[in-house]
Structure formats: C-alpha cells, structure tokens
Amino acid sequence: MKRRKKTSAAMERQKPGNPRQTTFGSMMDGVQWEEKILSTADLYSGQPYQRPVKNRVVDRLVREWDPRLLTPLVVSYRDGRYYLVDGQHRVCGCKKKNSGKDVDMLCQVYYGLTYEQEAELYYKLDQAKGHLRLSSATKALLESGSNAEIVDVQRRIEDAGFVWALDKPTGEPFEITATRAVISAYHLLGGAGFSRMLGLIAQAWRGAPGSLKASMFSGMALFLKTYETELDDAAFIKRLSAVDADEIIRRGKVDFSTNKAALRFARVIWDKYNGQQRRGRKLPYRFKG
C-alpha cells in the first residue's frame, strides 16, 4: 500500500516554528504551543512550585532506561526564558547518561503562560501521574493561587505568626509541617474556628515544635469543635501553657481505648485543661465514641 503524500497544509502544521492553539479552556485563552528541540543548557528549573529532584528517581530512570518512554518535556517561555515545568528527572537522567553534559531534548513549549498558570499546569500534570505528595501538591496549588481554600489556610497560618513549611522544613519554632491534619482542621472548624485554634496553640506553647505536629492539630481541632461555645480561651492558654506539648502526644499515643487518633489527643487536652485548675470551671466530657 502506498503512503499518501502529505499535503502542504499538513506539513506546515508540523513545522516546529508554527505555534498551535491549545484547548485548556477559558483560563488558557490566547496560550499557544509548539514542539521544538532545545538544549538542556537553555532550560531553567527549580521553581518554588516544583518538588525537589530526587537522586533515587534519577538513578532508577538511568538503570531502567528506555528512550521509547521519554515524552516531550513541558516548557513555558516566559520573560525571555525557557522554564522547565515538567521533566526535571528526565533532564537529569539524560545528562547523567551523557557524562553530565547537556543534551538536546524534544520539548512542548507554551507561550503566554503566567507563573501562576505554570504552577497550576505542573500541579495538574503531576496529579494525573500520581507523583506528588500532598505537601508538594499543596505547595503547587499555593503558588498557582487557583485554590481559594488553600490560599485562605495559608493566610490564616501566617496571620497567627506561623510558617507553613511544605517543602523545606528547618525545625525552627512556629514552623508547621503537617499538611493533611491542617487542612482537615480547617474543614472541621471553618476559617474563624481554625484561626482561633492557631491562636490558642501559639499563645499556649509559643511555637514549640511538639505543639505543631499532626497529632496535636487533629486533637486540638476535635477538642475545640466539641467545646467551641464552652471553652474559656484565657483559661485554656493559662492552663495548657504549663503542660509540655510532647507530653500530650506521648499520652495520646498510648491510649488504646479507641482507634480514632484525633479522639486520643483531644481527650488528653481535655484532661489537662480540667486538671490544671482545682477551683476553676471544668468542662464536662462530651466526646462521642
């Protein structure tokens, strides 16, 4: 069977220098793309929305190398530079196989993306591949500004004097590394209740790392949800500031009477609140389960 000769129009569409319109929807109106060969020396990576390159992933790519599986790199041409949006590990793998030297690679280059749109595209690409951990996905969403809820969580964390360290924690005081527990607390309490919880934690434990662990957030959220109208905030701060946050965590971990993790720590917080004051008003037990 003879192959049909390509028409001039078809050949024109396949030229690398001829950008084609995307179909990303209204947010991406006006964005164009083309496939072209670029040297890795011309690519800029390491954007805040990207997860760090992992050597073990690069080593696995090199060890199991199959050029047939190499899809085009996703690149954004912005402000006169080619920003590598997706494909950092592939680039590192190719360079490692080439003795560390730069190589030419096929790229799908987008024109007209903002930084925020790059971050959202990166998030969607990696979500589709299932590569991102929750903290990395949340970081990408924050950089994109596309998720109002996550942006609000971040704002309330900063307003309370904390740092949400989603990518490079340092272990410093007032640094929150929990992700799922923080988002769950926000969902349970709502924005105002979440801010109230952060304020109580900040004033009672002054940013101590133990007070900012996931177990503490889950316990505090349940405790505050249960006693939101009965709790005396000033009394809580005074009583719990005398309690080591790590002790709450230790006691919660050895409570095997329930398989509900949040309840274990909420019970300890309740017990400490009541036990630190002999004559003050105590909270009745209202937890379910």
Image (cartoon, rainbow, N blue to C red):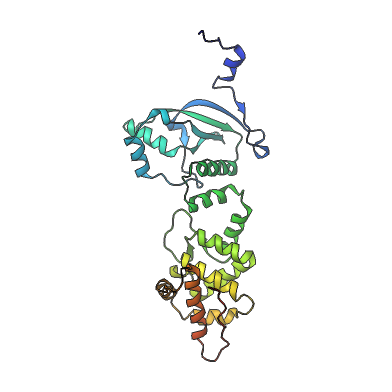
Drawn side of residue 16 relative to residue 208, left or right: right
Q: Is residue 38 above or below residue 189?
A: above
Q: Quadrant of residue 152?
A: bottom right
Residue 103 makes an appearance in the image: no
Residue 153 position within the rendered picture, expressed as x and y whole percent measured from the top left = 59, 59
Name the residue at 50% across, 42% down: 126
Residue 279 makes an appearance in the image: yes
Q: Nearer the viewer, residue 75 or 260?
A: 260
- The extreme bottom residue here reads 279
Q: Quadrant of residue 89?
A: top left
Q: Is residue 277 above or below residue 189?
A: below
Residue 75 position within the rendered picture, expressed as x and y whole percent measured from the top left = 52, 34
Q: Is residue 279 above or below residue 116?
A: below
Name the residue at 42% across, 62% down: 171
Drawn side of residue 219 relative to residue 254, left or right: right
Residue 161 position within the rendered picture, expressed as x and y whole percent measured from the top left = 54, 66
Name the residue at 64% across, 67% down: 192
Q: Nearer the viewer, residue 220 or 212?
A: 220
Residue 285 position within the rendered picture, expressed as x and y whole percent measured from the top left = 55, 81
Tag count:
0
Q: Is residue 5 above or below residue 99?
A: above
